[in-house]
Image (cartoon, helix red, strand yellow):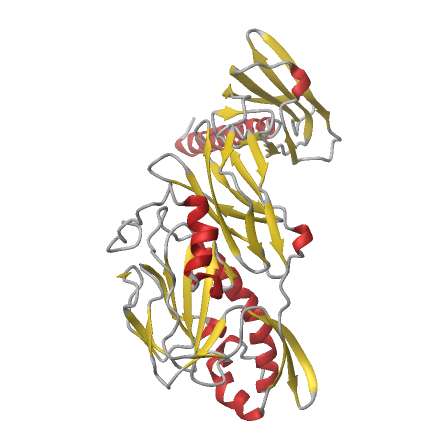
Amino acid sequence: MDKKGSGKFLHGFTVLALLCLAGIAIFFFLRSGGAPKISLTPDGESASYGTEFTIKLSGARGGLVSLNVSGVQDGRRVEFINRAFTAEQKEYSETFRLPRQSGFKEGPCDLVVEARGRSMLSFIGRGKSDLTRKLTLDLMPPRLSVSQGIHNVNQGGGGAVSFTVSKPVERAGVVVGDRFFPAFQQKNGEFVCYFAMPYDMPPASFHPKVLASDKAGNEATQTLSVLAIPKVFKSDKLNISDDFLNDKMSQYQQLYPELTQPVEIYKRVNSELRKKNVAQLQEIGRQTAPTQLWSGPFLRLPNAAGRAGFGDQRDYYYHGEKIDHQTHMGADLASVAGAPVPAANSGVVAFTGFFGIYGNCIIIDHGLGLQSLYSHLSQIGVQKGQAVKRGQIIANTGATGLAGGDHLHFGILISGLEVSPVEWWDEHWIRDNIIKHVGAAVAAPAQAPAQAGK
């Protein structure tokens, strides 16, 4: 064979070899399409009958065939999920709990998931995937021992409770409606929780309950004995002038570049931005010390006259037309322009900066989810993470944000929810409603750290 013929032969052989390799690759690619991918969450090792598992199947390019889920303990297998799928279904998700009728007992148990998928080549058959999660079943819920006594809680006000739990828990606190107020374990082993009745919750619907759940998901609850005290909140009518809009809306123009009319910007700020700020307050509320940093009644801005109060119902009018309705969540205190603002109590600065409707703002964390808010400031004299003492000057009053004139908007928050500040100015209220219920657990306030988180 001459060189030319030899070259053609080698070229043809190479092409044939590449085609064979490509065919083999395609064959295995199509065959692998029959085996689904299995995802099982949560990935913890402890479980109970209350643990909620989620299975997700994906990646079966030829479609799913079946799903089987079983529990295996001491050689006994209990199947409790058996699903068959149509040819078109390629993904599947299901949430489940271990069935109580399965008869599983505390101790080791295997959770076995088996899934089959169709191959994209029918003569190959089905691809199988399996996953085994080794679990330790913990079926005993924690036991709660809650401090005795009736809690007198004002609508829009706060309260406190201490309790002990019989075993280590992952989550503990007080549930009020759809809100959860976290509790913090103290050196003496007790948990302490500040909680509140939202201003817009009817007292008849206020049924706070202590909740504790362990790593396996076992939960224990106990309803608190409360006297829910209704409050009547003042109604107010505010006229929004063009001078106010022209003066204030430039602060927010960049947030709504598509709007040119100041009144339209105001509507968005007063509703949308307000809601965003409320959500941010809840996030900041999670940045709290696990111990009490405050002591004694909270300070009120000295020599200041009260203006708007907590829970005031405000109707906003522009040129005689009602354009909005909101609730004032704090206390407005007016003194001389640029008045020095003291820290209401000791703690650590959790936030400083321009904060939406509040303008220049400071938030101080006092531990256990309790925080104080100072807004509309002209000057800020502290930094985030800085420890402050009760009475220390931290800022000056101003008219930033949506303020119509120089004043301090002062707020108290419990786990990010604004509550009536008036209670926290009252030493008798603090003694009767906070210290009375948690005094033994937080007898000596902790020293505020130099930096948050340290």
Which residue is located at x 65 percent, y 77 percent?
A: 324
Q: Residue 285 at x, y = what percent?
A: 44, 55
Which residue is located at x 44 percent, y 62 percent?
A: 426
Between residue 432 and residue 402, name the one nearer to us.
432
Between residue 452 and residue 44, name the one nearer to us.
452
Which residue is located at x 49 percent, y 25 percent?
A: 46
The number of numbered badges drawn on the structure is: 0
**Left or right of 323, for residue 242:** left
Between residue 441 and residue 449, name the one nearer to us.
441
Which residue is located at x 54 percent, y 40 percent?
A: 210
**Left or right of 195, for residue 206:** right
Vertical side of 149 occupied by 387: above or below: below
Q: Is residue 301 visible?
A: yes
Q: Residue 287 at x, y = what percent?
A: 39, 53
Vertical side of 423 occupied by 219: above or below: above
Q: Is residue 125 visible?
A: no
The N terminus sits in image quarter: top left
The image quarter in which residue 345 lies: bottom left
Q: Residue 417 at x, y = what percent?
A: 51, 58
**Left or right of 452, for residue 229:** right
